[in-house]
Image (tube, rainbow, N blue to C red):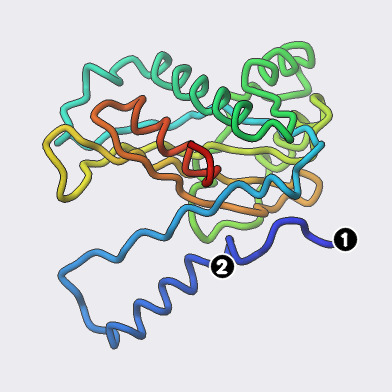
Amino acid sequence: MTNPFKHKYLLRGVWVGAALLVACGGKKTDHPPAPVPTAPLPTAGLAGQKVSVMPLTLAAAEDTLHWEALIADRRTTLDKSDSIIGSLLTARSPEVTWVGPAELRRAARRAAGIAAEPDQMGTSFLRADQLIDVPDPLRYQLRTLAGLSGARFVLVPAGLVFRHAPGTAVGVATAELSVVLVDTRVGRVQWRTTARGEGQDPWTALTRAVKSLTPGLP
């Protein structure tokens, strides 16, 4: 079967890293490497299909931002992030039928004892750049949950980190949202990227990060 998702997205980080090593001659540099550009959502290969969207389970901010009061309530932060991600996916990629976290939770409750709770799965470790094969039990859990919603592919927001944006005013942060797409039939990551966006509050930064997944739209 032809893979509708180009492997260049999985390999891009490796090639960029190799290019940097060659350019620097293996020597240390005082400047951190430039971040890999955000890869757009491969919606052409997903058009007309259902895709499950897992809930976010990991969100954190650098201490220097002093955003403790803004994201102190973990459940509120995760729910609001899920809402932003879900609404933007639906509005900006309507060719895909997105099955959001709320629907997945209902499906898991109806299949209690068979499907795991979406919020309790170890999806955050999928943000590891070199991970391609999804290990069990997560592989089985994703396949089971996706099957209940009639989906083959699962989009996983694997982690959200807010960092101070270099060269910007105090209080301006970059949201870094790690996103992976898993083919649950074969248990492999088919696409991954880190979406980035800047803002003076978490939700503006996250909104801009998610919008970067669908370039060409306002």
- For label 1, the crowd category at 10 Å Cα-Cα, with few meaning under 14, some 14 to 19 and many 20 or more, is few
- Labelled disc at residue 84: none
Q: Which residue is mark 2?
A: 11
Q: Residues within 10 Å of mark 2 (few under 14, many from 20)?
A: some
Query: Which badge, 2 or 1, is on the more N-terminal residue?
Result: 1
Tell me the kind of residue under disc 2: Leu
The location of residue 213, given as percent across then percent down, is: 52, 44
Relative to 84, 183 lies left or right: right
Q: Residue at x 74, y 24 (%)?
A: 115
Instruction: Residue at 46% x, 49% y: name it.
Output: 194
Counting from the top left corner in percent of width and height, residue 202 is at 32, 27
Q: Position of residue 107 (x, y in %)?
A: 75, 17
In the image as oriented, which residue stretches furthest toward the bottom? 25
In the depicted structure, whether residue 180 falls above or below residue 61:
below
Q: Residue at x 48, y 29 (%)?
A: 57
In percent of width and height, residue 12 lies at 52, 66
Instruction: Assess whether mark 1 and mark 2 are in contact (beta carbons under 8 angstroms).
Output: no
Q: Nearer the viewer, residue 91 or 188?
A: 91
Q: Is residue 105 left or right of residue 87?
A: right
The kind of secondary structure element at disc 1 is loop
Q: Is residue 26 left or right of residue 116?
A: left
Give the residue furthest to the right: 1
Q: Give the residue drawn at x 70%, y 53%.
A: 188
* Quadrant hosting residue 48: top right
In 3D space, how far apart are the residues under numbered discs 2 and 1 (Cα atoms)?
20 Å
- In this rendered view, identify the residue nearer to me: 196 or 68: 196
The amino acid type found where label 1 is placed reads: Met
SS of the residue at dot 2?
A: helix
Position of 97 with respect to 93 (left or right) is right
Q: Which mark is drawn over residue 1?
A: 1
* Figure quadrant of the N terminus: bottom right
